[in-house]
Image (spheres, rainbow, N blue to C red):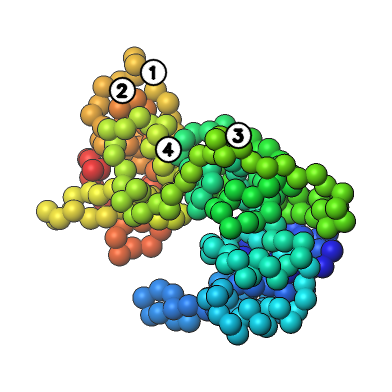
């Protein structure tokens, strides 16, 4: 199957890895150019760009999809089909017309549920027990093109953004492998989405990651699983009379019944239980496995307890 690939993230790399394992090698990878990263603002290629170079696959940089130079160069390639996974850009009409078989999008939800930029995070935040991946044809709308195929995926209790992303990306590769060649041959029946059933997601902001310990434990747990990687989950603790930011990278949920002594303690209280950093909520405990105090490196909850005497998080 001749195709080019559009992607910018780790999700894209997982898809590419699984495609290459089955002999599905793109003729061309389209991604964004290296950008300044970190405090030193060092020019750094994204993960897809690195992958392309490691596997000797040609790369087009596409920071402006409406650029005449970019569109003309892509037109000269005369590639029938494109596969898109976590590209993060709206495809203009002129670019859509360059692919006779269309651009097929791997979207990590069971469309029309969770259209938009954050379907995986939203599923985790909503404490869904099932999600999936959809392969559909991109049109000029947002995630509303006709569906080629879907695969379902159970969400395990300890799935976070990274683990669930990997599972859904693998499903996306399987959909391309199983249905892509048949679609190009006109042997797959596509079905339109029911717009009336559509739900939508938004891009999360930094303030969405602020933990409120007065919330139920399962809601906080879902928030950490969904947002700890991007945009980040955090709270504060007091040290030397100042509020210090504490990033939360990984946690576990410990449910409590009403009779537990822990259930009577006010939310946000820090408990050192067998060297575990436990925090009370309004109905359970959150075990903070890995945290990062402002200006420090990531450390275990127990290491944080050893270096800080605190009784409350806020």
Tell me how far mark 2 sits from mark 4, CA to CA: 17 Å
On the image, numbered disc 3 is attached to which residue? 130
**Is label 2 in a helix, a strand or a loop?**
helix
Image location of residue 38, percent across then percent down:
40, 73
- At mark 1, the secondary structure is loop
Q: Position of residue 255 (x, y in %)?
A: 42, 26
**Which is more toward the observer, 25 or 157?**
25
Earlier-in-chain disc, 4 versus 3:
3
* Residue 158, image quadrant: top right
Q: Quadrant of the C terminus?
A: top left
Q: Residues within 10 Å of mark 3 (few under 14, many from 20)?
A: some
Instruction: Please name the residue shown 66% across and 45% down the image.
Output: 133
Foreground residue among 147 and 314: 147
| Circle 3 or circle 2, nearest the eye | 3
Q: Closer to the camera, 275 or 289?
A: 289
Separation of residues labelled 4 and 3 (CA atoms) = 17 Å
| Contact check, label 3 and label 1, Cβ < 8 Å | no
Nearer the observer: mark 2 or 4; the answer is 4
Q: Are marks 1 and 2 in contact (CB under 8 Å)?
A: yes
Most extreme residue toward the top is 259
Give the residue at mark 1: 257
- Identify the mark nearer the N-term, 3 or 1: 3
Residue 122 visible: yes
Disc 4 from disc 1: Cα separation: 17 Å
């Amino acid at each position: 199957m001749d195709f080019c690939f559009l992607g910018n993230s780790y999700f894209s790399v997982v898809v590419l890895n699984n495609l290459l394992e089955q002999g599905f090698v793109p003729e061309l990878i389209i991604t964004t150019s290296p950008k300044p990263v970190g405090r030193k603002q060092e020019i750094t290629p994204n993960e897809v760009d690195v992958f392309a170079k490691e596997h000797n696959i040609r790369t087009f940089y596409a920071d402006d999809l409406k650029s005449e130079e970019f569109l003309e160069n892509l037109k000269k390639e005369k590639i029938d089909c494109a596969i898109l996974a976590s590209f993060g850009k709206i495809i203009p009409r002129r670019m859509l017309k360059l692919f006779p078989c269309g651009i097929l999008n791997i979207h990590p939800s069971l469309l029309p549920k969770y259209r938009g930029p954050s379907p995986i995070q939203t599923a985790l935040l909503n404490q869904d027990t099932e999600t999936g991946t959809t392969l559909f044809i991109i049109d000029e709308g947002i995630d509303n093109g006709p569906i080629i195929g879907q695969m379902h995926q159970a969400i395990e209790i300890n799935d976070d953004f990274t683990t669930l992303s990997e599972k859904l990306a693998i499903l996306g590769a399987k959909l391309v492998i199983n249905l892509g060649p048949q679609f190009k041959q006109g042997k797959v029946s596509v079905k339109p989405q029911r717009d009336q059933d559509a739900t939508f997601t938004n891009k999360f902001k930094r303030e969405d990651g602020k933990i409120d310990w007065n919330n139920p434990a399962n809601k906080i747990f879902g928030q950490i699983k969904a947002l700890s990687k991007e945009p980040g989950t955090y709270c504060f603790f007091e040290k030397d009379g100042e509020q210090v930011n504490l990033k939360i990278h990984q946690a576990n949920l410990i449910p409590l019944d009403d009779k537990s002594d822990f259930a009577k303690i006010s939310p946000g209280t820090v408990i050192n239980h067998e060297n575990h950093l436990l925090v009370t909520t309004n109905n359970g405990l959150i075990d903070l496995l890995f945290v990062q105090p402002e200006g420090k490196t990531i450390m275990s909850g127990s290491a944080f307890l050893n270096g800080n005497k605190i009784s409350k998080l806020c």
